[in-house]
């Protein structure tokens, strides 16, 4: 398994063990597994195309960057849903008026 694939796989596996994943319905689990497959296929395709066109070292770098971007996009909802520390951010402020 190539390093980019390992990064993406480990990230997606980590999501599966989050507490919210226990609340997923069957169709949501299938969508999650489909997204896992699409992400792996995308990284593999980028790796293959860049390996043929520009060579293996560049292909590994670009595929790793693609895996990081995909992982970042997948993590974005969880990062945006976090509660800020008390007293900081907009949620910790009182409304005036």
Image: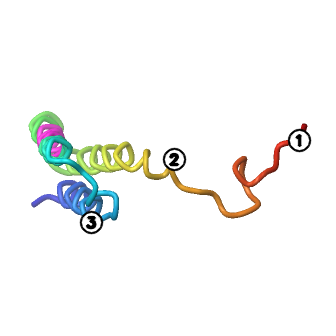
Query: Mark 2 against mark 1, which lies toward the viewer?
Result: 1
Q: Position of residue 26 (x, y in %)?
A: 14, 47
Query: Which of 53/40 is in front?
Result: 40
Q: What residue lies at 27% left-to-right and 50% top-to-bottom?
A: 61
**Circle on res. 96:** 1
Going by the image, does 46 lie left or right of 14?
Answer: left
Q: Which residue carries the number 2 mark? A: 80
Give the camera-side residue of 37 and 53.
Answer: 37
In-front residue for pair 46/40 = 40
Helix, strand or loop: magenta stretch: helix
**On the image, which quarter does residue 69 sit in?**
top left
Q: Is residue 4 magenta?
A: no
Please give left or right for residue 97 compared with residue 29 in the image: right
Name the N-terminal-most of marks 3 and 1: 3
Helix, strand or loop at mark 3? loop
Q: Position of residue 41 (x, y in %)?
A: 11, 41
Quarter that holds the N terminus:
bottom left
Picture residue at 19% right of the left edge, 58% below the top: 9
In the image, is residue 39 part of the stretch drawn in magenta? yes
Give the colouring mode of the picture: rainbow
Crowd tier of the residue under label 2, counting other residues whose Cα lies within 10 Å: few below 14, some 14–19, many 20 or above = few
């Amino acid at each position: 398994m190539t390093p980019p694939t390992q990064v993406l796989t480990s990230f997606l596996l980590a999501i599966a063990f989050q507490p919210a994943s226990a609340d997923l319905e069957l169709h949501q689990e299938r969508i999650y597994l489909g997204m896992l497959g699409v992400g792996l296929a995308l990284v593999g395709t980028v790796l293959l195309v860049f390996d043929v066109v520009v060579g293996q070292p560049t292909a590994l770098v670009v595929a790793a960057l693609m895996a990081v971007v995909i992982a970042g996009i997948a993590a974005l909802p969880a990062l945006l849903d976090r509660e800020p520390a008390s007293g900081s951010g907009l949620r910790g402020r009182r409304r005036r008026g």
